[in-house]
Structures are given as C-alpha cells and as structure tokens.
Image (cartoon, rainbow, N blue to C red):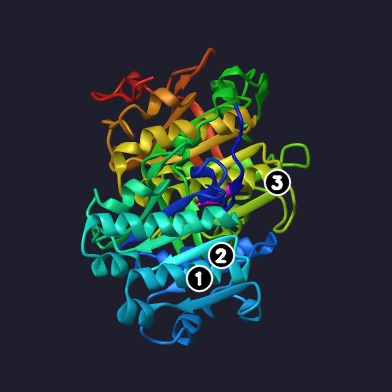
Amino acid sequence: MHDMSRLTTGISGLDQILAGGFIAGASYIIQGQPGAGKTILSNQIAFSHLEGGGKVLYVTLLAESHERLFQALDVLDFFDRSKLGNDITYVSVFQTLRDEGLDAVVKLLRRETKRQGATLLVFDGLLNARDRAETDFDVKTFVAEIQGQAAFVGCSVLFLTSSSVKEISPEHTMVDGVVELTDTLAGVRSVRQIQIRKSRGSRAIGGLHEFEISNTGITVYPRLEALADPGIAALEPATGRVGSGLAELDALLGGGIPRGSVTLLAGPTGGGKTTLGLHFLSQSNAEEPGLHFGFFETPHRLYAKSRSLGIALPASGSPDLTMHWTSLSDNILDKLGDQLLDQVQQRGIKRLFIDGFGGFERAAHHRPRLIEFFASLVDRLRALSVTTLATWEIRELVGTDVTAPARDLSAILDNMILLRQVEEDHRLVRSISVQKVRDGNFDSAAHLIEFAEGGLAIGASLHHELAAPSSDPIDG
C-alpha cells in the first residue's frame, strides 16, 4: 500500500492521532467554539511548517489589524516575529469580502498564494464567508475554487470556523478532514478535547483526546488505550524474582516479587503502603534504577520519612532513584500516563513505585475508561520488564471488611497485597496478607506488621479470626 506524503503538525500527540499528520496537499476544517484553541493550533502548525522550509499564507477575516493577534501570540514559545512577512504572511480579506464578495476573495487568494509561493494556506473565518454566500452551492463553489488553486500550486489548506456550523454542512462534504476542538465543563473543571470527525483516505484514531494550552502552545495527549501496541502480546514475559526490601515479605510471596509484574498494595491510610514502597525503592541501584511516581508526598517529605524510619534510599539526585511528584490539581489522565512512561523509558527504570492509583482516578473525568487505561498502562510496563508496586487507598480506616478497589482492576494486576487495621482490646493491630501471586505459590495467612526501627517489621501469623476472609473479598 502506498503511503501518502504527510504534512506534520509539529504536535506529536496530534500527529499520532492523524497517523503521521495531515495529508500533504489536502484540505481540512478546524472547528470549535470561540476560545477552544483554533487560532493557537493553526498558528502552531504554521510555524512548525516553516521549520521544514515551507511557506505559509495566513488569511483572516478580522476587521482589526493583525497586531492584536500578534500580541496574543507573543506569549507562546513557537511564535517568532522575525518570520513575519518573509516565511509567513498574514493577509486580511475582511474589506474585500465586505465590498466585493466571495469571487473577489477567491481572486485575491489565487494571486497571493502564487506570489508568496505558499505551501500551506490557513483561512481563518470560513463561517463569515459562509454567511456572505447566498446558497449552499455558493459555499461549495468558494471552497472548491480555493482547493483547486491550492492543489495547482501544491499547497495544503486549513479552514478555521466556528462550531456553530451545523454538523452536516456544505463545506464538510468538500474537505478531506474535519478536526474539532471543544472546551467543556466536567464538574468545576475545564476539559479541552480534540476529535478527528472526518479523515478521508487516511486512518485516524477516533474518539476524544484531551489537550492543554500552555506557553509552549497546544499539547495533545492521545488516549493511552487507543495507542495499544499489538506486538506486546508476542513479547516473552520477564522471569525470576526481585527483592521487596523486606525478607519476611519475600518469603510470603514465595521468594520475592515476580520480575516484570505489577503488584497492588491495598490498604487504609496509615497502614504502611508508602513505607513498604520505600523499602522496595531502597533496593534501587545502577542495574535496577528506581522511580517513585506519586501525588501525596513531596520528595523532601519522602526522604525525611525514610530517614526517620531507618530506610536507606539512594541519595537525592542519584541516577539510581528518581522522585517524580505531581500535585493533585487539574491533571489530565493521559498526560500522567505519558509522563510516567516517558520517565521509565528515558531513565531505564526497572523498579517503579506508584503512590497511588487514586491520583490517576481523580484525573479521569470519564471514569468508566479507567480499567482500559490501567490495562494499557500495565501492559506497557510489563513489556519494558518493569517491576511495579502501586497503592490503592481503602476508605475503611479500621475493620475487617474490605471493598474491592475498583471493578475488574484485580483481573489486570499480577499480584495483590492487603494491609489492614483492626482494633483489638483498645489497641490498633496492623496486618499484612498476600491475596494473589499470579502463577506462583504464596503464603496467604495474615501476619502482624508493625512500624519498628528500620521500617516495617513482619511478625508471626495472626489468629484465625483475624486472618479469615472478609465478607467482600478482593477478587483474584
């Protein structure tokens, strides 16, 4: 099959969604309500196009001068005023449209496209042009004439328009693709999403993908599960065992944590989940670099905690251990996944402690997709032979009943360790039990666990009453 030449957008996530970028020489509509990010996106694509030696003609229907547009773009890293008038030319056709109509606009664009030697034409204001047309046929003729001229000189076209255009409209039938930007509220959060509504002659990843606008411009985060690599299933799983940092726990697990597996530590606040994770990371070294990916405690607090408990972590700044902390703010689920996988791949991480999965859950404004997201994430970690521990907060601080952390979550994880707290004779008793080790033997009895000098200390098996299964056990 012949691969079509692509016009890359310069936005890696968007190029992934578009299977490499726009088709060179084709025409696309970028639509969205005011403030959705159309102008930033089109200008970012335009300036990226210049880096490859292209020429851009940017046509607007603005009544005011372009200086106000440039002032808004000045805060963005990609905008370079030195390129104006040379590699990229901004032309307003507002007066031409008002005084002479659509035919005159077409003639002006035909002349300027050829004169500038443009390889990318951006037309900002398709809805305004549509309002000036008397019939749908006039709209189709206008779009067709611009496309024809662009194709003649080897130029790609981006039409920008308001999302008030009906879902089925004349211009949609004329172009090769439609990209829609939305900015909606999910509770009190503003959620920006992008969708490829049409992609003629080219595959694209459908559905909604979140994006953000920052000083660097627009960054698109494709849905992690939509980027699934079918080759993962053919990879041989890692073999052997790695130490947890606690010899007693390694014994309960049947000789340590299976290499390349994903283990869930479920338990209430104060049960010892983070401390157990610090024990695990204390074994990080040059052959097995470690990563703490967390939301609740900063690196300074974690190092202070490890010192107070007597757990010896690799020194701060050592390549053997990386601390990545993200505050619980308006996070984007797929951005978190992208950051985690990037750290793992860039640093060759082999020991990963995620504290905790709840930080991902809070970032998901559409929670039904969490299982698919987690499944895709752990598949990638296994493929990279990363041994992973992740925590999940159980709401019950004290008690013997345990609620499954998330429906179907246990099915996608390899191992599960449960930490509990019960009150006995007015004293808080903590216990640890291994609930599941995939394809391995393990000791399922609940054992006493205490905070002691040197961190956590695992003691003897508890009485049968404390070790009995809960009324709502975690599935295995």
Question: Which quadrant is home to the C terminus?
Answer: top left
Looking at numbered disc 2 in the image, what kind of residue is underneath it?
Ala
Left or right: where 333 falls relative to 303: left
Q: Residue at x 61, y 54 (%)?
A: 323
Q: Quadrant of residue 103?
A: bottom left
Left or right: where 316 falls relative to 27: right
The front one of 304 and 70 is 70
Q: For the residues carrying marks 2 and 1, which lies nearer the camera in this image?
A: 1
Looking at numbered disc 3 in the image, what kind of residue is underneath it?
Arg
Instruction: Tell me the element at label 3.
Output: helix
- Residue located beneath label 3 in the image: 347
Q: Residue at x 54, y 13 (%)?
A: 440
Q: CA distance from mark 1 to mark 3?
A: 41 Å
Q: Quadrant of residue 427?
A: top left
Residue 10 in view, yes or no = no
Q: CA distance from mark 2 to mark 1?
A: 8 Å
Please say whether residue 293 is one of the residues in the magenta stretch.
yes
- Residue located beneath label 1 in the image: 58
**Is residue 136 positioned above or below 197 on the image?**
below
**Is residue 214 positioned above or below 325 on the image?**
below
Instruction: Tell me the element at label 1.
Output: strand
- Residue located beneath label 2 in the image: 46
Q: For the residues carrying marks 1 and 3, which lies nearer the camera in this image?
A: 1
Extent of the magenta region: 291-295
